[in-house]
Amino acid sequence: MNTIQEYYKKQFAEHGFLPDRDNHIYCGVGSTWRLSDAIGKGTFWLYGEQDLFSVKIHDFYFHEDTVMEFSWPECLGIMQYDSISGEELSPYRRLEAGIVKSFIGGYGTYKVLIHKKIPVRSMGIEIMPRYYEGYLKEQYPGEYSNPLKAFAAVGQTMDFPEMDRLLKIVRDYRGSGLAAKLYYQGKVAEAVSLIVEWSKKQGQKQEVKKKLSVQDIKDLDNITLYLNDHCLQEISLDQIVKVSYIGARRLQTIFKEYHGCTITQYIQQRRMSQAENLLANTELSIGQIAQAVGYSNASRLAELFCKSTGMLPGEYRKMAHRK
């Protein structure tokens, strides 16, 4: 018996989702559930691997503001929201599009207010205790460490582009049979790896903060905000130094310690994130997108985009638009 599928059957029924066996827009190894027309419109897709992990895609909206109250199974989860309008109610926190969010299931009731008419479009992965306390421990007995703290450290962030990219690739995958099952096994392991590595980097960043002066941290936060606002423009190191009030050599050193990348790499990461958004959500040509994100021609964008994502811009657009 697929225990994850069985667990969610009751949850789906209580919130107006009905089995939709004729829906073939998602990967064939999962099951699709359709929201009742009286309540809203859209679908919820789920693939569960026994009691090890699940992969979920939400794409629905409610006709009216709706409070949802439900219990997650004991699990560690990670989600990415393309579209959302609502608030978590216990404790209160606004949900935002563009975020990556972790959650720890099995320790209480989850309550959320979803605003009417706005689609809930998200992609998520959950790993169950048998996966992280059993499977991982068996596979890596000498190196195993419970990933709960790593998942908790993510919280809710817009600063996790690697996970954002991974979840979108998984969302757009359309395979079948054994190939699909093996694909999801690999991507779940990759997601856990990214979370553990991200958590480690955050810990390192905290150690760096302890070594830097209060003024250094204030200056670095200011320059980071400046780069976020101006990263699509041509910015010289001289300009950045003038804004930061830190000498060029020292700025480059402490910026890399603080962010784990150079200033140039940071700007490129921001530009690639914007390029991904424009490729997925606009009809602009690749040349136009290149200029919009700060490059003089499409070939330069293609070179850097391929290094960042492993795909050319045209390939990424095809995947993002795939039905």
Image: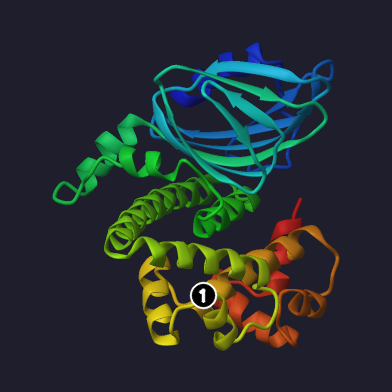
Q: Nearer the viewer, residue 256 or 82?
A: 256
Question: On the image, which quarter does residue 136 sit in?
Answer: top left
- Residue 254, position as x, y percentages in the image: 37, 74
Q: Nearer the viewer, residue 216 or 268?
A: 216
Q: Secondary structure at mark 1?
A: helix
- Residue 82, position as x, y percentages in the image: 68, 46
Is residue 310 visible in the rendered image? The answer is: no
- 106 is higher (above) or lower (below) than 30: above
| Left or right: 170, with 115 as reference point | left
Residue displayed at 43% across by 84% down: 247
- Residue 134, position as x, y percentages in the image: 25, 35
Quadrant placement of the N terminus: top left
Residue displayed at 64% across by 73% down: 231
Residue displayed at 67% across by 22% down: 113
Is residue 256 visible in the rendered image? The answer is: yes
The amino acid on which the numbered mark 1 sits, given as a three-letter code, is Ser
| Left or right: 137, with 106 as reference point | left
- Residue 71, position as x, y percentages in the image: 50, 17
| Left or right: 139, with 85 as reference point | left
Question: On the image, which quarter does residue 132 sit in?
Answer: top left
The residue singled out by tag 1 in the image is: 244
In the image, farthest residue toward the left:
142
